[in-house]
Image (tube, rainbow, N blue to C red):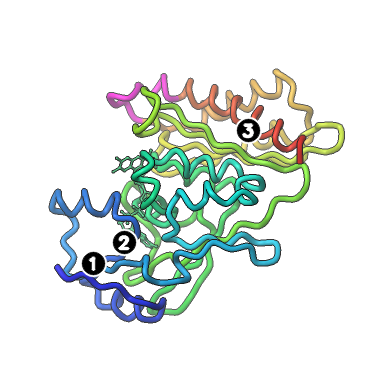
């Protein structure tokens, strides 16, 4: 296998167009997979030498986060953490300090694990993925990239260049919580990403709820969003959102939890994340 480090998006596109090459960023998923014998690319294409892929910047009212930016850089960017705290806390949960110095949002998304921590947060923040490939550049909602475990909608030769997130308006904030059986370094039993907007009286004007690890791909919960929008966040309204999250799950039984347990945890985490996001939104 040959190591190649292109210096530009265009160079990477021409290398990846051949089909025998695979792009990677932090390699925290890619390397263990290579060691297990799958995949077996002829060329491993290191995306981290491309400036645009490791750039994190505010462009007008849009945060632009390179697909290969390591998670730790997100946590160091104070303004980003203040404006999109849920997104940053999802990145800060990935693995250990060592893993976070390598792991990227692009890799977390494109590895397409149902339990990937940053994806529910990116989905509720309505992130967009800028994709490069033989057909040129295109921008799609993050929510449309993962199509199943280990499967994405990227065409052959395509890779994610960067993510775009609109800066949230006043009194809008997000949160991401996950449950794992130990305190760190484990895969989510359930992950819950939420985003809320409040009016001056504290009533919710808009909500987004997305769950990870409870179905083959991240699940958006429109029934919870409808139960919240236009209402004060009373215990009764929050209980409706929790019930909607439980109903939206399509989980599996495994050693981390049964289907029933996962459903229950999804409801509990939805309420906790909503309370956290509401407190943050009230402060903005
Ligand atoms: C010890 C350990 C703990 C972990 N803990 C967690 C955790 O708590 N939560 C969690 O969600 N994950 C966890 N992971 C998994 C992993 O760290 C994350 O998924 C990480 O975000 C992957 O990013 P990466 O840059 O290392 O991806 P890579 O390994 O470089 O790539 C992963 C996959 O995505 C593809 N890819 C990478 N970048 C792009 C791109 N820009 N465009 C298209 N395809 C691309 C690669 O071809 C590969 O198939 C853990 C892994 C380890 C080893």
Dominant secondary-structure state across the stretch colored magenta: loop
The residue range painted magenta reads 252-262
Q: Dividing the picture into quarters, in which one does residue 167 lie?
A: bottom right
Q: Are marks 1 and 3 in contact (CB under 8 Å)?
A: no
- Dividing the picture into quadrants, the one containing residue 260 is top left
In the rendered image, the vertical position of residue 224 relative to residue 220, given as above or below: above
- Tell me residue 92's x, y (percent): 47, 41
| Location of mark 3 (residue) | 224
Residue at horizontal 44%, vertical 30%?
A: 190
Mark 2 and mark 1: span between their CA atoms? Answer: 7 Å
Looking at the image, which residue is at 14% across and 48% down? 36
Considering the image in quadrants, where does the N terminus appear? bottom left
Query: Would residue 253 be found to the left or right of residue 219 on screen?
Result: left
**Tags 2 and 1 touching, CB below 8 Å:** yes
From the Cβ of disc 2, is ligand 1 less than 8 Å away? yes
Image quadrant for the C terminus?
top right
Query: Which residue was labeled with disc 1?
Result: 44
As drawn, the label of residue 24 is 2
Work out whether residue 212 or residue 14 is closer to the camera in this orientation and state it.
14
Q: Badge 1 local density, few (<14 within 10 Å), some, or many (20+)?
A: many
Q: Give percent across and percent down for residue 178.
A: 47, 31
Residue 50, position in %: x, y?
40, 72
Kind of element beneath mark 2: strand
Q: Is residue 160 above or below residue 8?
A: above
135 part of magenta stretch: no
Disc marking residue 280: none
Q: Secondary structure at mark 1?
A: strand
Nearest-to-viewer mark from 1 and 3: 1
Marks 3 and 2, Cα distance to the nearest angstrom? 36 Å
Residue situated in front as seen by the camera: 58 or 228: 58
Which label's residue is closer to the chain start, 3 or 2?
2
Q: Is residue 180 above or below residue 199?
A: above
């Amino acid at each position: 296998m040959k190591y190649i480090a292109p210096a530009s998006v265009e160079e990477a596109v021409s290398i990846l167009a051949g089909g025998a090459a695979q792009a990677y960023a932090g390699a925290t998923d890619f390397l263990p997979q290579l060691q297990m014998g799958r995949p077996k690319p002829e060329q491993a294409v290191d995306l981290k030498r491309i400036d645009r892929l490791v750039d994190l910047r505010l462009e007008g009212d849009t945060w632009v986060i390179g697909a290969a930016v390591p998670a730790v850089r997100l946590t160091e960017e104070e303004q980003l953490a203040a404006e999109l705290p849920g997104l940053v806390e999802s990145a800060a949960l990935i693995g250990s300090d060592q893993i976070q110095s390598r792991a990227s949002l692009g890799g977390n998304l494109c590895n397409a694990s149902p339990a990937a921590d940053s994806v529910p947060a990116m989905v509720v923040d309505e992130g967009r993925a800028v994709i490069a490939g033989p057909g040129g550049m295109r921008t799609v909602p993050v929510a449309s990239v993962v199509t199943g475990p280990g499967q994405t909608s990227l065409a052959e030769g395509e890779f994610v260049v960067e993510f775009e997130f609109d800066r949230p308006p006043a009194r809008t904030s997000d949160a991401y919580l996950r449950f794992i059986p130990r305190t760190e370094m484990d895969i989510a039993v359930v992950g819950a990403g939420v985003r809320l907007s409040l009016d001056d009286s504290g009533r919710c004007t808009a909500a987004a709820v997305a769950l990870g690890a409870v179905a083959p791909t991240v699940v958006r919960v429109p029934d919870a969003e409808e139960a919240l929008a236009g209402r004060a966040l009373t215990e009764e309204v929050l209980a409706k959102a929790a019930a909607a999250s439980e109903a939206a799950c399509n989980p599996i039984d495994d050693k981390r939890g049964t289907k029933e347990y996962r459903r229950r945890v999804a409801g509990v985490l939805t309420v906790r994340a909503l309370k956290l996001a509401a407190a943050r939104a009230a402060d903005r």
